[in-house]
């Protein structure tokens, strides 16, 4: 759960409000042709029978032990993974970006933290574009995305609008990033500027397309405490597993929490309903939101979160073969005991939808106590407790 303190935000100008009205009208027009083939329905008010699964039965798993040396002592934040590179950072916002190859060999440490035009202050997201040997570093609050090559050389800056707050961001195609506007989701309707999903240019950050997802009423998953009259501050609470954009093979799945339907958005810009929820989010008080965790060719792993303090939740999975919903537990077969696999990490890309980091000291303990098998056991046998983490990639089966 995230907690932050925010000063009161000023109202938008009148002309911006007029633009909001226009965008909302367009959102209801449904410009994309939509098909309902394979649409499933999830009742978020129900409980479901339990299903136990083995991760390796439906996903491939790859372990990457990251090299450790005096310069490369990195944290456990996996930012991006490509065919040839792994990008890591620390969680303390020190500005370090660590680049490894896919075997875990340390390649380059980059730090461009600062206040200059070619520097970032807060590193909120990194998108890797190996085809162009580039990475996009999102400094969300500074309203800019900085583009560097993989040696850390500055290439260009993408300026983003003051009206938007891009946090979730992915490589869509050769020319575009697909982004989600967190400002729209986390503020009241009075501050809403239209659609939350859009494509932006990789060259200058301009918005090339707003993706229209219809909904009846704008909702927020955020819980705010009352404003302190002396300081003008208030606390904000939200769950950590909110992923509005989820890569799904060649497509992206878009979860607009204000809508009753989750859509799949394709590279040809067509949109198809994928999951419908019931009851309607507008009919529930407090609301229950349907969030995405991991999508495979057979299973849709999801989470139902209630908008209450501490955000009570339940994990559910839809089995496309059985055409049924279950609660679930997923175990990693590389452990001799029942070690649960965590499926609610930040989605990486279309080929690697999820990952975990495994702390070296814990793997050493598990190895010494005989709890490991296979490739993971081989890796742990060579680890020192002070080593960098081992990255566990959860990949679609080929």
Image (cartoon, grey):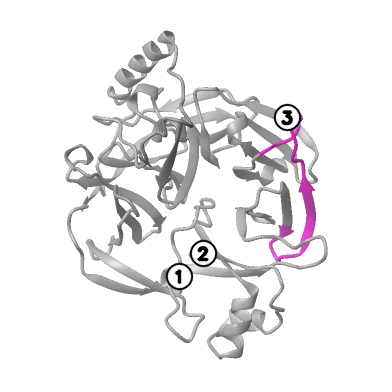
Mark number, residue 156: 3
Residue beneath disc 2: 394
First-in-chain label (2 vs 1): 1
Mark 2 and mark 1 residues within 8 Å of each other at the beta carbon: yes
Q: Earlier in the sequence, mark 1 or mark 3?
A: 3
Left or right: residue 167 versus residue 84 is left
Provide the secondary structure element on which disc 1 rests.
loop
**In the depicted structure, whether residue 392 falls above or below residue 258:** below
Q: Which residues are magenta?
A: 100-121
Identity of the residue drawn at 25% across and 65% down? 326
Mark carried by residue 341: 1
- Which element is circle 3 on? strand
How far from the left and from the top, in percent, is residue 275? 28, 47
Taking depth in this image into account, of 176 and 234 the one nearest to the observer is: 234
Residue ID at (64%, 77%): 361
Label 1 neighbour load within 10 Å: few <14, some 14-19, many 20+: some
Of mark 3 and mark 2, the one earlier in the sequence is: 3
């Amino acid at each position: 759960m995230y907690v932050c303190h925010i000063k009161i935000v000023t109202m938008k100008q009148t002309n911006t409000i007029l633009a909001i009205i226009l965008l909302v009208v367009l959102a209801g027009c449904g410009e994309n042709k939509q098909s309902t083939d394979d649409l499933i329905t999830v009742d978020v008010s129900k409980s479901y029978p339990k299903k136990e699964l083995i991760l390796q039965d439906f996903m491939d798993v790859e372990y990457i032990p990251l090299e450790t040396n005096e310069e490369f002592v990195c944290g456990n934040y996996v930012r991006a993974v490509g065919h040839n590179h792994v990008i890591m950072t620390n969680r303390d916002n020190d500005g370090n970006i660590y680049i490894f190859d896919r075997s875990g060999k340390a390649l380059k440490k980059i730090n461009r933290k600062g206040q200059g035009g070619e520097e970032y202050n807060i590193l909120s997201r990194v998108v890797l574009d190996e085809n162009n040997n580039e990475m996009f570093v999102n400094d969300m609050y500074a309203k800019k995305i900085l583009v560097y090559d993989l040696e850390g050389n500055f290439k260009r800056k993408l300026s983003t609008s003051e009206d938007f707050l891009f946090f979730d961001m992915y490589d869509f195609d050769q020319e575009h990033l697909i982004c989600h506007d967190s400002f729209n989701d986390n503020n009241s309707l009075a501050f809403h500027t239209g659609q939350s999903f859009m494509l932006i240019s990789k060259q200058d950050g301009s918005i090339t397309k707003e993706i229209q997802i219809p909904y009846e009423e704008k909702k927020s998953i955020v819980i705010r405490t009352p404003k302190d009259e002396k300081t003008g501050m208030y606390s904000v609470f939200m769950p950590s597993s909110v992923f509005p954009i989820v890569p799904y093979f060649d497509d992206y799945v878009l979860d607009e929490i204000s809508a009753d339907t989750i859509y799949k958005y394709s590279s040809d810009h067509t949109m198809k309903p994928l999951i419908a929820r019931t009851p309607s989010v507008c009919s529930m008080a407090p609301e229950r939101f349907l969030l995405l965790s991991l999508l495979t060719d057979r299973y849709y792993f999801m989470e139902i979160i209630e908008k209450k303090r501490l955000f009570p939740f339940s994990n559910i999975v839809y089995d496309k073969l059985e055409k049924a919903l279950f609660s679930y537990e997923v175990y990693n077969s590389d452990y001799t005991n029942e070690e649960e696999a965590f499926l609610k990490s930040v989605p990486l890309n279309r080929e690697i939808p999820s990952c975990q980091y495994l702390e070296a000291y814990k793997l050493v303990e598990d190895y010494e106590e005989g709890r490991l098998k296979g490739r993971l056991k081989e890796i742990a046998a060579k680890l020192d407790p002070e080593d960098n983490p081992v990255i566990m990639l959860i990949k679609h089966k080929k």
